[in-house]
Image (cartoon, rainbow, N blue to C red):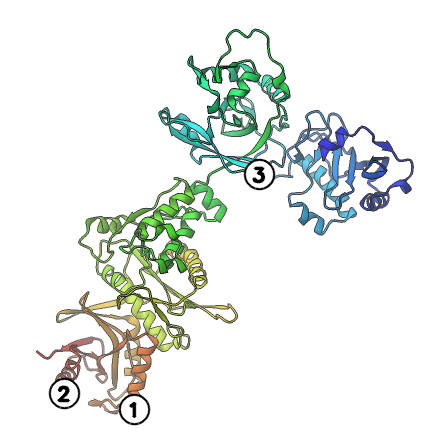
Amino acid sequence: MTEEFHELVDVSEIADAAALTIPRAKALFDSVLRQRDYTVVQLLQHSAGDVPTLECLVVEVECDGVPPKNTAGINYRERLALCVPDDPKLLIEVLALRKDFPVLIHQNQGIPGAAASLCLYFEPVATVMRMWTPQSFLRRIQWWLEKSARGELHPADQPVEHLFFATKYELVLPWNLAELRKSTAHRFVIAKGSERPDKGFTCVLEAIPRDEAFKAGTAAPIELVLPPVIHGFVERDPVTLGQLADLLSRRGIDLIAALRAELHGRVGDAGIAATADAKFTVLLLHIPICRADGEPPVRTSHRAFVVMIGAMELGVAIGALMLHEKRHFKDLLNTQPATQWRTQDVLPMDVLSWNDTAAARKQSGIPEEGPSGVLIGAGSLGSAMLNLWGRAGWGRWTVIDKDHVKPHNLSRHVAYAQHIGDPKASVLADLHAAAMHGASEVTALNLDASDFKQSALTDALTAAKLVVDASTTLEYPRAASAVDAFARHCSVFITPDGNAAVLLAEDARRSLRLRTLEAQYYRALIQEAWGKDHLAGNASSFWSGASCRDISMVMPYSRIMGQASTLADQIPRAAEREEALIRVWQRDPTRGMVNVYEVPPLSERRMKLGEFDLFIDAGVEGQLREYRTKGFPNETGGVLLGYYDFNVGAVVVVAGLPAPPDSKASPGSFERGIAGLADAVSEASRRTAGIVNYIGEWHSHPPGHSASPSKDDLIQLVHLALGMADDGLPGVQLIVGEDDLQVLQGTVK
């Protein structure tokens, strides 16, 4: 808009506001008359034929909020042109008519030497127009002047080396550009992307080995290092090569001499075939930025311009090269300085950079870089969480999984069709590399996570700071709980219907392992109201192959992603705390509401029980002692619920049920009844998806007595062993005494 306005030659003055025809110009004029800080100086109009296409209100505005003698150079009273286009979808442009109006950051890019165009809004035009009024527009102008005068218009971390410009062209720099520029083993090339519908395109600066040939669609950039400038220095971008040369000349750099030297070095004595010339040339300027005059640079700013001709053709234009028999050669005999190059258009490029992990964390609002971690399981949940963490720059990950991608996985996995047959762990590593462009790496181990005989596996699990188990199996977390050398673990999983997510996190010292957290989670399912249907719901399955083992659950990817997002957010928080954690998120699929339940983790006791290790936590023991106290002066008892795991040689007590109502009790004996017991055991098994079942009996001794077994207790143990032998399981008898607890095992041989 600025450029078009200054090219108008038939702007005429309007003597009377009645001649205004554009509705917004009329409304704006009325609003100016009502504003005590604004004064109309002149009205201008431009027409195409007989139709007005632009009407301008030249005004003077006074701003009480502008500090006197401010460093920005804004005056208390400024003369502005409010240029109203006839297209209601375009913004009204505000031009500062004072010739020495300062060049500030929030100005629109325009022709050097032309009136400054104020950049009033940060939002897209459509967003601005949705709530635009003449009154708010006039206030916005004063806000801009006052904020600019105080140096408060832009955020503290915003670059302030050039004006705002809307460009269709982008240059993406490597995240490690500073290190790459020091390397003598690499050189830079520009890879030009496809042209977009608006004719814009994105270029990527890539580092390649020096002996590697240029690929099609690439070209070498022309780089210049400028002298340092002071932070906050702002200047307009040039729009022609001549203006760029003049700008650099004021900085002490001879652009044409630099271009000549660069291009002479490229062509050599043998010249270059004209067909090898690209159709574009990128000029990349490196500008050291200092905080104050005389101080060393604190960072380097980068500016870029694209010229829509190849470097060889540009060399001919500046007289550095000549074209002979379809080859470009050095032009060493040309003594007549060329000038036509000065009108060659140069287009500013928006300079972007690939994310490094620090930038990713900043954009994600994550203050900590995260641990050196291991992810067990690269399935639906694990892949989704790693994708979220990787893009957020949290953690340095090794992922372990022995499985490969199958066609049915694509319905709820980050993999794509081209990954069918590839190891899942390797796929996650490759996808992470594609997203982070080498700023961080994921290490893939295509191993069975439960086979601790593999040194690469155990080394990773020992060296890590955090291990996240997303394997969805019981084998790994139970086996890992028995290895003291491993890092702190947490386990996550989603319930069969996808409507709940569970996080079990060990404490920092691993005094509470996943094994006991799992048992305490089951006890909550059995005893809490929210556990009634927690593991129930849609547990449908489908055949993914011909084998009887090729069965997968039916679940939409949306539920996986919803729960993965929650867990990916919560695991870093759990890792920051020292304490163990058992937390459940239960979602109502009808309304989308989520309830959160937390189970207080309790300490665990380990007892030797024949060939097994028996584990019982303080929660079970506390409940049994409470039942004992309530039964005084009589003995009491009931059944034990828990599970055996022969793979790890463990029996885990999950809960003890109270005495059935038809039990017989006295101060010296207890005979357990059966009323309602079968239903209670069945319900516990149902709520825990068949994991928790009957494992034995418990009873108490009266006040003042220890837990040492009596003759009757041993007889009961024999009967218990005979009963459990039908299932090939040993029987567990637990006795609660005054101050002690004893566990006996009965086995039929």
Q: Which amino acid is tagged 3? A: Ala
Quadrant in which residue 36 is drawn = top right
- In 3D space, how far apart are the residues under numbered discs 2 and 1 (Cα atoms)? 23 Å
Q: Which amino acid is tagged 1? A: Ala
On the picture, is 301 further left or further right than 144?
left
The percent position of residue 490, horizontal first and vertical second, equals 33, 59
Q: Quadrant of the N terminus?
A: top right
On the picture, is 238 further left or further right than 537?
right
Vertical relation: 76 (above or below) 516: above
In percent of the image, x 48 and y 45: which residue is there? 362
Work out whether mark 2 precedes mark 3 in sequence or the reverse, and give the earlier one.
3
Q: Could you classify mark 3 by the number of other residues whose Cα lies within 10 Å: few (under 14), some (14-19), or many (20 or more)?
A: few
The percent position of residue 398, horizontal first and vertical second, equals 31, 49
The percent position of residue 159, horizontal first and vertical second, equals 56, 35
| Badge 2 element | helix
Q: Which residue is mark 2?
A: 712
Q: Which amino acid is tagged 2? A: Asp
Q: Nearer the viewer, mark 2 or mark 3?
A: 3
Q: Is residue 253 visible?
A: no
Mark 3 touching mark 1, by CB under 8 A?
no
Q: Is residue 608 visible?
A: yes
- In 3D space, how far apart are the residues under numbered discs 3 and 1 (Cα atoms)? 73 Å
* Rendered image: mark on residue 675: 1
